[in-house]
Amino acid sequence: MGVRVEKMQEQIKHEVSQIILRSLKDPRIGFVTVTKVDLSSDLRNAHIYVSILGNEQQFKDTWQGLKHSVAYIRQELAKRIRVKFMPEIAFYPDDSMQYSAHIQALINKIHQSEQKGKSDDGNNAK
């Protein structure tokens, strides 16, 4: 991937984060973190990955708010980033944080069962 594409990805990630944080007034949108931007090599399409914190209803509400705001966000990007063609943007959920939390919960469960197994073995030895 070229340096130009990488710079654009970082710039889009930063600007979209700022737009969501400061400019969007949609009450449905909760806590959103832009985690990654994948930009096509021809700079025509940007896949923006977001992590949304909250329960399932908050996720759904925030997701609907983001989908509804795509045109506004693209318009704001065009004002902030000077390029000949502004890429089409699309949001995608980044569930890596939830996956990490799930893996951590499984590891904790294994450790707890190991600790319980050791304490049971200690009681039987008496």
Image (cartoon, helix red, strand yellow):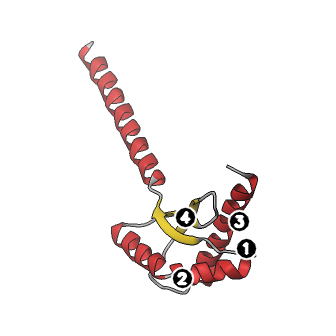
Residue at 42 percent of width and 73 percent of height: 63
Q: Are marks 2 and 3 in contact (CB under 8 Å)?
A: no
* Comes first in the chain, label 4 or label 1: 4
Residue at 62 percent of width and 83 percent of height: 75
SS type, badge 3: helix
* Comes first in the chain, label 4 or label 3: 3
Instruction: Report which residue position mark 1 lands on.
Output: 83
Amino acid marked by disc 3:
Gln
Across and down, in percent, residue 30 comes to 48, 75
Q: CA distance from mark 4 to mark 1?
A: 18 Å
Q: Nearer the viewer, mark 1 or mark 3?
A: 1
Amino acid marked by disc 2:
Ala
Q: CA distance from mark 2 to mark 3?
A: 18 Å
* Comes first in the chain, label 4 or label 2: 4
Q: Is 80 situated above or below 6? A: below
Label drawn at residue 11: 3
Amino acid marked by disc 4:
Ile
Label drawn at residue 48: 4
Across and down, in percent, residue 66 comes to 48, 76
Q: Residues within 10 Å of mark 3 (few under 14, many from 20)?
A: some
Label drawn at residue 120: none
Amino acid marked by disc 1:
Val
Instruction: Report which residue position mark 2 lands on.
Output: 71
Q: Nearer the viewer, mark 4 or mark 1?
A: 1
SS type, badge 4: strand
Q: Is 106 situated above or below 64? A: above
Along the viewing direction, whichever of 126 and 28 lies nearer the viewer:
28
Along the viewing direction, whichever of 76 and 99 lies nearer the viewer:
76
